[in-house]
Image (cartoon, grey):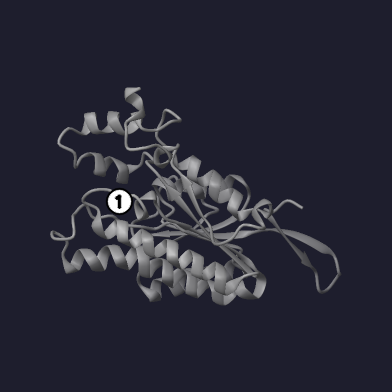
Amino acid sequence: MDSRWRVVCSSSTDEIIMLPKTAIITGGTRGIGRGIVDRFHKDGWNIVTCSRGQRPKDLNEKIIWEQADVGNINDTDRVIEKTISTFGVIDLLVNNAGIQVEKNIMDSTDDDWDLVIGANCRGVFNMCRASLEHMTKTGGSIVNISSISANASDPSMALYNASKSFVNGLTRSIATDHGPTIRCNAVCPGWVMTEMADVVFELASNPDVAKKDALSRHPVGRFGKPEDIANMVAWLASDESGYVSGQLFTVDGGLTAASPINPGLF
């Protein structure tokens, strides 16, 4: 059976009906999130996505979009209610929404804490808790977008690095507490070329040299694309990964597999 479809038995005719599955994808208007939205839309899923900003003009009209701050429980509940009222079920939750602040811990303010932890930790917590209320009744999968920064910290990204460690811990806890009905995994991207990645390179004294050096450390010979992460999420949402739960999948072009010695020098 194609894992994109939900099989439903009609109560009036006893006919077997195949309906598209439904996914909530937070932060789905740009970068990695947009790549995931585009992949699942192409695959025929019902999609609800949200972001703090405005709806992108090029977002397909069939995709439901809500303006929402996932760190705000009222916004979270509104996204869930919209999904249930429209489609009646949540088959997949992808927690992608995230914020980074380019500061070390001494320079970070209380407002920085509230911003990053609010989105990256409370936002994931809010969405998981609210979704599980429905998903535990019908079954489903949760995929959290973490980062290699949880284990290999990027400089001047103290709060972001810490927040992704929280995501990893929560992923394992949900898998442990809510299986077998729910599977929960995390994808840990490396350097994926989005606006967020460009901002980090701009912190270097010579951004062009920094980017060239970073590229040389990737055994696959390139930086990642949003589609690379979307492909992994699609597999984790499929029946092919039915025995997979509580795992953290690094998708970084081999970056963290190498020693600190720059392989581009050999």
Left or right of 122 in this view: 234? right
**Dot 1: element:** loop
Between 160 and 193, the one nearer to me in the picture? 160
Label 1, residues with CA under 10 Å away: few <14, some 14-19, many ≥20: some
Residue at 43 percent across and 60 percent down: it is 50
Where residue 229 sits in the image (x, y, percent)? 49, 45
In which image quadrant can residue 207 be found? top left
Quadrant containing the C terminus is top left
Kind of residue at badge 1 = Ser
Where residue 93 sits in the image (x, y, percent)? 53, 62
Against 99, is 121 above or below? below
Residue at 19 percent across and 42 percent down: it is 203
Count how many numbered circles sit on residues in the image. Answer: 1
Residue at 60 percent across and 55 percent down: it is 237
Q: Is residue 212 visible?
A: yes
For mark 1, what is the residue? 153
**Extreme residue in the right direction:** 14
Between 21 and 223, the one nearer to me in the picture? 223
In which image quadrant can residue 158 be found? bottom left
**Extreme residue in the top direction:** 266
Where residue 239 sits in the image (x, y, percent)? 68, 54
Where residue 16 sits in the image (x, y, percent)? 82, 63
Against 152, is 112 above or below? below
Q: Is residue 69 visible?
A: no
Residue at 48 percent across and 70 percent down: it is 128
